[in-house]
Image (cartoon, rainbow, N blue to C red):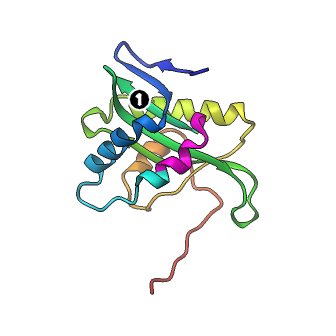
Amino acid sequence: MERSLEINDNVRIRPLSKEDIPSILEIDGKITAASRSSLDREKINYYLRNPNLCWGAEASGCLIGFMLGDIRGWEFGLSEAGWIEILGVDPSRQRKGVGRALLTAMIDEFKNRGVKTVRVVARWYDPILSFFRAEGFEHGELLSVQKDL
């Protein structure tokens, strides 16, 4: 049964499907035009294996935003957590509640599945962090370290 949520007269949140892949890639291309994106069909298909953890925002029959997530707990012995992997909102629709509505749908699904922690990984200087901070996200127990070769 498809679940959907209307956020206003023009936008609804719904589970994504494989038919949405071209639109997802188009939105991602608009966002990452200045840098090369690592998002591709294979990665999207990986997340779509669990459709209620992949949400789309649709207006007038067109996809205007998406959020891909996962539930896993195998990293470094951590308990199971919901992971928000990729969020994309068409630049012309940003700052209008679309990302918040996608996040609400994702968090509701995590709660329905008994998940107690939601994690997001981003570059420390990425503007998306201000969105997540505004939504109540705080520093977690993970710290990234790396060595360039």
Asked where in the image residue 123 lies, by quadrant, the reply is: bottom left
Residue 137 seen from this side: no
Residue 91 seen from this side: yes
- SS at badge 1: strand
Instruction: Give the class, few, some or many, for how many residues have Cα within 10 Å of label 1's Cα (few <14, many ≥20).
Output: many
State the residue in front, 96 or 5: 5
The segment highlighted magenta reads 44-52
Percent x, y of residue 93: 29, 32
Total number of numbered labels?
1
Question: Where the C terminus falls, by quadrant?
Answer: bottom left
Q: Which residue is at 75% across, 37% downward?
A: 114
Q: Amino acid at mark 1?
A: Ala
Residue lying farthest to the front in this orientation:
19
Percent x, y of residue 69: 56, 45
Question: Where the N terminus falls, by quadrant?
Answer: top right
Q: Which residue is at 69% across, 33% downward?
A: 111
Seen in the picture, residue 80 relative to 142 is either above or below; the reply is above
Seen in the picture, residue 115 relative to 9 is either above or below; the reply is below
Please tell me whether residue 27 belongs to the stretch shown in magenta: no
Percent x, y of residue 6: 46, 17
Q: Which residue is at 52% across, 57% downward?
A: 121
Please tell me whether residue 50 belongs to the stretch shown in magenta: yes
Which residue, given by chain and number where applicable, does mark 1 sit on? 57
